[in-house]
Image (spheres, grey):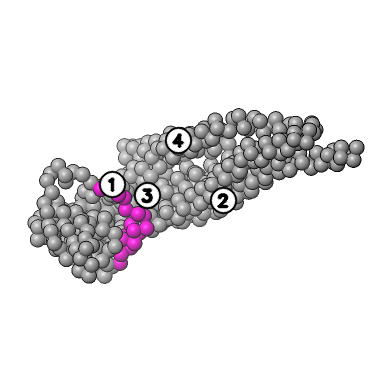
């Protein structure tokens, strides 16, 4: 297989052209794979080995992955081969990056490379996707594997979107309120203080406290803003900081603990069910499913349970009880599945239960966050009012009395 740069020119608009990378055994095959309706191939150029190592860092959006795996699954149900399904799906795709990836995978399949290796060589798909494709291929259920992947990615995307909305929107509102508060203390309150000085009126004791606090804010706000920006940047760039903050929140907030624990258990059980139902043996499926919680305290327990299960022959449910920090309901139903030879069905039931429970906890978490945001907004508005309007109200009667005298 060689890598080619194929230049396509728009038939209706000749001044528009596109260049895509294609893995193919020959120039003719590269030109054929790159063909798109409305375009014609004008140049096929072979790339040297050094350039070939340079891969695009552009990832495939989750929405595109869901549509792709659903499309491939539907074509498999219609008895269309994987190679032809990839060709049909790639034709007319507006995303050139995904089109190139699918054509490269198809060309590898045409050259006899196994399907999971053909996907893995693109370095765009995680281990769980590759493993499930391999398991589906070995079990002759590749279409079911594609369908399972589409469902799993969709659930992950829904939970990620809900969590992002529950946190990001309130965070933006709070940042805006902080900016408004600083502005009121630095500019508005200082103008009120200047007005009182201009009429030669001494502020009362409460106004003195308000003005003193304003002076403090005027001196310290640059340091606070710099620290806040550094914290936000660190939050986005440092996984260690995010992990420590999450652990701190989980220790002190039971609702957050239930939410995170439920999401992790749902991800593990769902991935385990997906792998085991598609032909991966339980020990290997458990190790691979543990990777969805890698970097969390639960990961080590799952790995120990998997190794214990494979080395000692102890029932898997018992190994999970010994090493993994799971809800008793999980190990109990897994034990029932092992004893009754209905483990795939029990795992599927557990997956559905935890997805529903996590969705409920997510709704409660969102409501609490919204209430906290509202409380902070009321507090900030109170500070703005107290700083800018209260001194004027307090000094008004005194100014009127001084005018009469």
Q: Distance between the residues labelled 1 and 3?
A: 29 Å
How far is the residue under mark 2 from the one under mark 3? 28 Å
Q: Tell me: 27 left or right of 312.
A: left
Residue 157 image offset from top left, x and y in percent: 42, 54
Q: Earlier in the sequence, mark 2 or mark 3?
A: 3
178 relative position to 16: left or right:
right
The total number of labels drawn is 4
Looking at the image, is mark 1 or mark 4 earlier in the sequence? 1
- The residue labelled by disc 4 is 234
> Residue tagged by mark 3?
272
Count residues near mark 2 (Cα–Cα under 10 Å), then give few for <14, some for 14-19, many for 20+.
some
The correct choice, above or below, for 401 with respect to 87 in the image is above
Percent coordinates x, y for residue 32 in the rendering: 14, 63
Instruction: Answer with mark 1 or mark 2, whichever residue precedes in sequence.
Output: 1
SS under mark 4: helix
In the image, residue 38 lies in the stretch drawn in magenta: no
SS at circle 1? loop
Please indicate, yes or no, whether residue 91 appears anywhere in the rendered image.
Answer: yes
Q: How far apart are marks 4 and 3 (CA)?
A: 33 Å
**Whole-percent x, y for residue 217 in the image:** 63, 32
Question: Where does the C terminus fall, quadrant-wise?
Answer: top right
Disc 2 marks which residue?
366
Q: Name the residue under label 1.
A: 57
Query: In the drawing, does residue 82 fall left or right of residue 354?
Result: left
Residue 158's place in the image compared with 224, above or below, is below
Quadrant of the rendered image containing residue 295: top left
Q: Earlier in the sequence, mark 4 or mark 2?
A: 4
Q: Kindly state the secondary structure of the residue where label 2 is placed.
A: helix
Specify start and end residues of the magenta stretch as a single range.
56-74
């Amino acid at each position: 297989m060689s890598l080619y740069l194929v230049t396509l020119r728009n038939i209706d608009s000749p001044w528009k052209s596109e260049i895509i990378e294609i893995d193919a055994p020959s120039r003719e095959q590269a030109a054929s794979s790159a063909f798109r309706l409305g375009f014609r191939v004008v140049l096929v150029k072979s790339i040297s080995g050094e350039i070939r190592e340079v891969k695009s860092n552009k990832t495939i959006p989750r929405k595109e992955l869901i549509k792709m795996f659903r499309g491939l699954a539907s074509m498999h149900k219609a008895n269309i081969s994987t190679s032809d399904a990839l060709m049909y799906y790639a034709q007319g795709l507006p995303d050139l990056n995904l089109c190139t990836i699918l054509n490269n995978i198809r060309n590898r399949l045409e050259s006899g490379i196994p399907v999971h290796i053909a996907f893995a060589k693109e370095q765009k798909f995680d281990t769980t996707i590759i493993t499930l494709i391999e398991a589906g291929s070995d079990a002759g259920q590749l279409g079911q594997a594609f369908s399972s992947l589409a469902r799993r990615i969709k659930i992950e995307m829904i939970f990620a979107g809900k969590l992002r909305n529950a946190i990001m929107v309130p965070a933006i509102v709070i940042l805006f309120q902080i900016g408004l508060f600083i502005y009121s203390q630095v500019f508005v309150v200082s103008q009120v203080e200047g007005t009182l000085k201009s009429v030669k009126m001494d502020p009362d004791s409460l106004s003195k406290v308000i003005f003193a606090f304003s002076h403090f804010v005027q001196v310290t706000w640059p340091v606070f803003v710099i620290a806040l920006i550094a914290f936000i940047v660190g939050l986005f760039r440092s996984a260690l900081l995010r992990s420590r903050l999450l652990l701190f929140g989980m220790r002190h907030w039971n609702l957050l603990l239930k939410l995170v624990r439920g999401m992790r258990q749902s991800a593990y059980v769902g991935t385990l069910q997906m792998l085991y139902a598609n032909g991966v043996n339980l020990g290997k499926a458990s190790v691979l499913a543990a990777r969805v919680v890698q970097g969390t305290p639960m990961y080590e327990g799952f790995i120990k349970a998997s190794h214990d299960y494979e080395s000692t022959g102890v029932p898997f449910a018992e190994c999970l009880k010994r090493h993994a920090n799971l809800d008793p309901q999980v190990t109990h139903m897994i034990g029932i599945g092992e004893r009754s030879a209905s483990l795939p069905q029990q795992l599927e039931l557990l997956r559905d239960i935890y997805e529903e429970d996590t969705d409920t906890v997510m709704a409660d978490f969102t409501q609490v966050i919204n209430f906290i945001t509202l409380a902070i907004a009321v507090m900030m508005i109170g500070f703005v009012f107290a700083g800018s309007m209260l001194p004027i109200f307090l000094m008004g009667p005194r100014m009127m009395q001084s005018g009469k005298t």
